[in-house]
Structure formats: structure tokens, C-alpha cells
Image (spheres, rainbow, N blue to C red):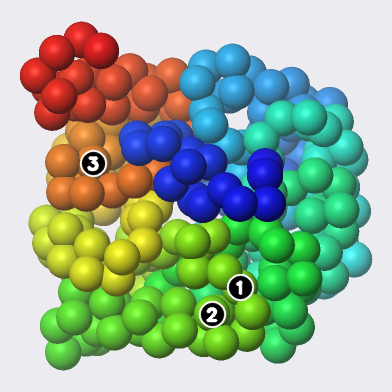
């Protein structure tokens, strides 16, 4: 990472963010990577599969999840970040102490599902480090976010929220060119609201910031294909959703199944160009 690099320069479109959940209770892979060595091996494999960035998280944000302390979260992620030293890594956290330590251990981006609202010191930590940040929309909090979410117009409401959070970040010293935004698919939205966000994703382009989309293995996809318990069905559905998001302007896709997503996006990008390379 150079001092002058923007998000777009650092991660050309389309890029894939691979997921490493160091948690016992995440939605699709909780408990699989609680052992640091297993998580490190998985992170390295995601990079070899084509991930431009590996997102390490130590606290589940699935619907109904309970928060963990900063000390516990850091104890989960620190050994993994150390083991992935030298690889492109982001930290999935809303806690400033965890973000600060992760950035010191080499993380380049803070992926904050609260869009800098969860910890009053987070903006300062990101700004002082000159780090990249992803600001995500979430209605409510993970424990309650799926309890009857309501919007006047989900796309307009999400757009207005993200516009305010980008302004807040810039006002607090974070460089605008280092900010990306995430509409928060599945975070305080019904299945139909998720689909409406994806259908009108191009409207978020008015923010002038790259859009990250995390739709991988989400329950909305299981409802569409009618077989949410089948891993193979959700992989195919996740790649289809990723390509659809890319076609509507998404810059980066957060994915569990990195190789399949990279390949799907490579085809979509080639079609957009009208040539192989």
C-alpha cells in the first residue's frame, strides 16, 4: 500500500474479498476456522484462489448474534493476522482497539458493519493509520436487525445513510479516496428488500465511491433456489448474485467461495470488455 493509492488503484474492478470467520457462530462457516492454524491455511488458500483481500473477523454479525468483548475478539484474530503477514488483509470489526491492533499487524482496510457508529474512536484510528475503510449500512444491530425491518424506499434510505456516513468519515480525517461503501445485504432487510437493493445497485454510484457487495451464501439466495441447506446450490446462487451485482456496478465482491466467484466475475468482465484481455 502506498501513501497515494486510492481504493480503485489498490483493488481494480472486479476484485474479490475472501472471508475468514474466526468465530464459533457465523452463519455459514461458524466453527470451521476457530483454530488459528486452520484459519491461516484457509486465508492463504483464498489468496491463491484469487482473493485480492482476505477479510478476517472475530465476531459474528449473523442475525441474532450476541456481541463479544474487544479482548476476546482480538484474541481470536491476532494470531491469524500474524500468520497472514505479508498478504493483503482486512479486519472485520466495529471496535477501535481491535482495528488499531489489526492495522499494526498489517491489515490495510477496516470493514466496519456499523459505518463508524459502533465506536466513537474508530474514525480517529482509521484516519491516523491512513487506512482504507468500508462503511456498511445496517438497520438496528445484529441481535435485532431482522425483526420487521422497514423502509420508505430501501434504496433511497440506504443511499442517504451512506452519503451521511461518507461525509462523517471525511470530516473526521479519513481520505475520501480510501472509502468504499456496502449496502449491507441481509443486515436489517427482508429478502425482497435485498433483491431491490441488488436490482437498483447502480443508484449507489451517485456516491462516487466503490461499492462492495456481500451476498455470498445469504439466506435470501436459499429462499430463491429453495435449497438453502445445499452448499452446492448456494455456491451457484452466490456466483450468480455476484455477477448480477457486478453488472450493476459493484466494484468488490465479498465471498466465501473465492475461486468460483473469481471465475464468474472474470467471464462477466470479459463480456463487458468484448474481448479476452
3 and 2 marks in contact (CB < 8 Å): no
Identify the residue shown where x is 33% and y is 18%.
263
- State which tag comes first along the sequence, 3 or 1: 1
**Residue at the image point whose x is 61% and y is 51% from the top:** 4
Q: Nearer the viewer, mark 3 or mark 1?
A: 1
Whole-Å distance between the Cαs marked 3 and 1? 26 Å
User: CA separation, marks 3 and 2?
Assistant: 26 Å
Q: Which residue is denoted by mark 3 in the rendering?
A: 246
Q: Which residue is mark 2?
A: 170
Q: Is residue 147 visible?
A: no
Up/down of 169 relative to 247, above or below: below
- Relative to 30, 115 lies left or right: left
Which residue is farthest top? 276
Front position among marks 3 and 2: 2
Do the residues bearing badges 2 and 1 touch, measured as CB atoms within 8 Å? yes
Question: Helix or strand or loop: what does disc 3 sit on?
Answer: helix
Between discs 3 and 2, the one toward the N terminus: 2
Which element is circle 2 on?
helix
Location of mark 1 (residue): 174
Tell me where residue 172 appears, x and y as whole percent.
63, 85
Amino acid at each position: 500500500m502506498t501513501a497515494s493509492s486510492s481504493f480503485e488503484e489498490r483493488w481494480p474492478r472486479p476484485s474479490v474479498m475472501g472471508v475468514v470467520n474466526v468465530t464459533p457462530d457465523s452463519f455459514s462457516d461458524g466453527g470451521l476456522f476457530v483454530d488459528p492454524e486452520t484459519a491461516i491455511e484457509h486465508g492463504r488458500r483464498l489468496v491463491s484462489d484469487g482473493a485480492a483481500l482476505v477479510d478476517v473477523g472475530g465476531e459474528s454479525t449473523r442475525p441474532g448474534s450476541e456481541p463479544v468483548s474487544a479482548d476476546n475478539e482480538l484474541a481470536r484474530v491476532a494470531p491469524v493476522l500474524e500468520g497472514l503477514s505479508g498478504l493483503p488483509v482486512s479486519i472485520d470489526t466495529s471496535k477501535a482497539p481491535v482495528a488499531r491492533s489489526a492495522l499494526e499487524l498489517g491489515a490495510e482496510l477496516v470493514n466496519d458493519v456499523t459505518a463508524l457508529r459502533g465506536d466513537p474512536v474508530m474514525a480517529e484510528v482509521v484516519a491516523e493509520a491512513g487506512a482504507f475503510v468500508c462503511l456498511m449500512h445496517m438497520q438496528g444491530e445484529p441481535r435485532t436487525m431482522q425483526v420487521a425491518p422497514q423502509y420508505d424506499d430501501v434504496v433511497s434510505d440506504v443511499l442517504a445513510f451512506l452519503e451521511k456516513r461518507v461525509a462523517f468519515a471525511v470530516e473526521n480525517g479519513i481520505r475520501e479516496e480510501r472509502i468504499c461503501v456496502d449496502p449491507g445485504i441481509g443486515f436489517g432487510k427482508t429478502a425482497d428488500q435485498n433483491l431491490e437493493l441488488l436490482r437498483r445497485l447502480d443508484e449507489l454510484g451517485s456516491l462516487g465511491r466503490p461499492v462492495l457487495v456481500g451476498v455470498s451464501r445469504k439466506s435470501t439466495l436459499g429462499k430463491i433456489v429453495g435449497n438453502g441447506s445445499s452448499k452446492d446450490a448456494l455456491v451457484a446462487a452466490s456466483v450468480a448474485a455476484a455477477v448480477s451485482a457486478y453488472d450493476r456496478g459493484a466494484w468488490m465482491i465479498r465471498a466465501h467461495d473465492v475461486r468460483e466467484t473469481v471465475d464468474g466475475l472474470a467471464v462477466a468482465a470479459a463480456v463487458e470488455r468484448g474481448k479476452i484481455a
